[in-house]
Image (cartoon, grey):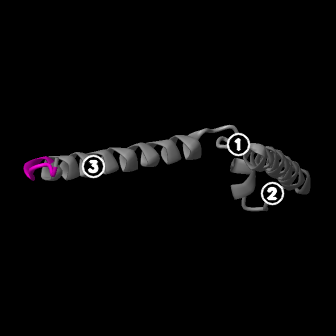
Amino acid sequence: MEELASPSGPKKEFVNSHCREFMQSMKDIQVTLREEIKSACEYRPFEKCDYNARIANEICFQKLEYVLTQLEDLKQTADRYPSSD
């Protein structure tokens, strides 16, 4: 930092050295980001997931429970009337 703040200005080699370090750091960051993005694009957590099938089964189960309660109510209503036998 003292070199950059000197009254005569920094030496060209010093600036070039820092610029090379900075550019190398930027390249390293780009490579890392590229790898992370590629990895994220290839990541498919739900590819082998059975979530849709489980939800469909749960919905069917709830529908069946509802129909059974309706049938039970219908049976109770029918049992209130005398049989025609």
Magenta span: predominant SS is: loop
Residue at 73% over, 43% down = 43
Q: Residues within 10 Å of mark 2 (few under 14, many from 20)?
A: some
Q: Position of residue 76 (x, y in %)?
A: 15, 47
Cα separation between marks 1 and 3: 39 Å
* Label 3 vs 2, first from the N-terminus: 2
Identify the disc placed on residue 47: 1
Cα separation between marks 3 and 2: 90 Å
Q: What's the magenta region?
A: 79-84
Is residue 13 rendered to the left or right of residue 62? right
Give the quarter of the image for residue 5.
bottom right
SS under mark 2: loop
Q: To which residue does mark 3 refer?
A: 71
Which of labels 1 and 3 is toward the front?
A: 3
Q: To which residue does mark 2 refer?
A: 10
The three-letter code of the residue at mark 3 reads Leu
Which of labels 2 and 1 is toward the front?
A: 1
Tag 2 near tag 1, CB within 8 Å:
no
